[in-house]
Image (tube, grey):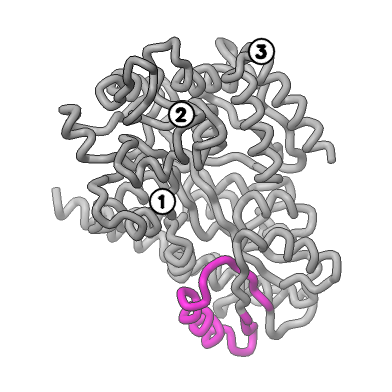
């Protein structure tokens, strides 16, 4: 069995490597194919959120390889300010040639990006190289970005609270989460919560509220927003034939904050869910893989582990992931060098250095297939393989819309379908801007 596994790994690496070499040759980065120059060659500027200390060796290696084709100057940007800075740079015609961007900024600025043509990377090559969720960057004209990392949503759980409740393993599905909830929740006669099974049901004190709702919706069969390769559209009223995924997800989500139901385990007066988890009073926390270093730093004594997010028993086997991509800006006057640098970074093992610098996961099947001896990291890789996402062009604004939808139900202002219809209307107005 072990020899079979080693043989499969060898085949994965061999054929994956051959495919990478083929793409690099075809694109003119390795000898064997000479692409027609587009614009000037020379030094290109790359913006990104990866700390300089974690990407400097990669840039140095790129520049050694790129002598005569390209040189890269990397400029680190604060992730919280990068969107506004890119907008200002585009307006002033001082934008970089390349940028490593989260998916929301990629979709926000998609009209200003140079799509990677299908003639350079075929759909077959793209699908064989990258996880299925990376297809989010596919447009009618090519790929909006070359994927370099994914940050999957996972389940962090408190092992001490599980042990006290005599629960052996974390829930593999949402049904089991509901069954375990009473064992992990402590509520007094006045309905005051002193320990919670899971933070679900509200909008004001849940760190990844939009991600959790989107996860439920995606597993149910539809994303909040869809992309047909050209146009973004609201999918809040998508119909699977039997039910509306958004309404079903909203009903499931909000039940946990209803004190009249047996699933009651969370309310608006509690602290932020991650802080409650760090204090040892929250059994399950839905967080991103990139949050691990911060959780360890803030409470090194917390006895916790990590598991896959729960699935629907009859739903799709997936989790939500935040994808990062390497984009080429249309306004670059050095497209030949920019494209060469982009391919050299994205289609070699250097891409893993970018994902590590973001505390995220690689998106190449070949790298995920190699596994990781760290059991926590292995969970991240397992989730990275099946991560999917949705095209969110305005992170802050869509978050407000999703939160308003949740609040509308929790406050009793209307029914869940009314809240979904209002969210659909708000998303349509946003996408029309």
| Marks 3 and 1, how far apart at CA | 35 Å
In contact (CB < 8 Å): disc 3 and disc 2: no
- Mark 2 / mark 1, whichever is N-terminal: 2
Residue at mark 1: 289
- Mark 3 / mark 1, whichever is N-terminal: 1
| Marks 2 and 1, how far apart at CA | 19 Å
| Marks 3 and 2, how far apart at CA | 19 Å
Give me the residue at 67% from left, 58% from top. 119
Q: Which residues are magenta?
A: 45-73
- Mark 3 / mark 2, whichever is N-terminal: 2
Q: Classify mark 1: helix, strand or loop.
A: helix
When the figure is inspected, residue 276 is found, relative to residue 354, above or below; the finding is above
Residue 11 drawn at (x, y percent): 31, 57
Residue at mark 3: 414
Residue 93 drawn at (x, y percent): 84, 71
Residue 334 drawn at (x, y percent): 75, 77
Quadrant of the rendered image containing residue 270: top left
Q: Residues within 10 Å of mark 3 (few under 14, many from 20)?
A: few
Quadrant of the rendered image containing residue 398: top right
Q: Residues within 10 Å of mark 2 (few under 14, many from 20)?
A: many
């Amino acid at each position: 069995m072990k020899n079979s596994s080693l043989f499969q790994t060898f085949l994965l690496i061999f054929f994956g490597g051959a495919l990478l070499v083929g793409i690099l040759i075809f694109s003119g980065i390795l000898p064997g194919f000479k692409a027609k120059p587009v614009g000037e060659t020379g030094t290109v500027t790359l913006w990104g959120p990866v700390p300089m200390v974690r990407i400097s060796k990669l840039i140095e290696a790129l520049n050694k390889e790129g002598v005569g084709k390209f040189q890269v100057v990397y400029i680190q940007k604060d992730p919280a300010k990068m969107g506004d800075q890119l907008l200002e740079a585009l307006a002033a015609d001082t934008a970089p040639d390349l940028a490593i961007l989260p998916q929301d900024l990629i979709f926000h600025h998609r009209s200003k990006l140079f799509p990677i043509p299908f003639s350079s990377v075929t759909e077959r090559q793209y699908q064989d190289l990258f996880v299925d969720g990376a297809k989010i960057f596919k447009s009618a004209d090519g790929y909006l970005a070359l994927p370099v990392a994914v940050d999957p949503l996972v389940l962090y759980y408190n092992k001490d609270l599980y042990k006290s409740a005599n629960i052996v393993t974390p829930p593999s599905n949402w049904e089991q989460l509901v069954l375990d909830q009473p064992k992990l929740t402590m509520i007094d006669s006045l309905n005051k919560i002193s320990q919670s099974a899971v933070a679900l049901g509200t909008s004001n004190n849940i760190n990844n509220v939009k991600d959790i709702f989107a996860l439920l919706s995606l597993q149910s069969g539809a994303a909040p927003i869809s992309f047909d390769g050209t146009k973004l559209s609201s999918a809040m009223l998508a119909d699977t034939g039997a039910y509306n995924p958004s309404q079903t997800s909203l009903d499931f989500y909000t039940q946990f904050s209803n004190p009249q139901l047996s699933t009651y385990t969370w309310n608006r007066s509690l602290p932020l869910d991650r802080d409650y988890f760090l204090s040892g009073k929250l059994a399950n926390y839905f967080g991103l893989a990139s949050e691990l270093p911060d959780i360890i730093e803030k409470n090194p004594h917390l006895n916790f582990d990590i598991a896959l997010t729960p699935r629907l028993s009859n739903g799709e086997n997936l989790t939500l992931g935040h994808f990062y991509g390497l984009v080429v800006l249309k306004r670059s006057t050095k497209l030949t060098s920019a494209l060469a640098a982009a391919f050299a970074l994205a289609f070699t093992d250097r891409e893993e250095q970018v994902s590590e610098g973001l505390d995220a996961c690689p998106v190449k099947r070949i790298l995920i297939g190699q596994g990781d001896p760290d059991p926590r990291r292995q969970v991240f890789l397992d989730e990275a393989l099946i991560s999917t996402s949705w095209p969110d062009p305005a992170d802050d604004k869509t978050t407000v819309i999703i939160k308003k939808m949740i609040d509308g139900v929790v406050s009793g202002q209307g029914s869940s379908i009314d809240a979904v219809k209002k969210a659909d209307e708000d998303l349509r107005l946003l996408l029309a801007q």
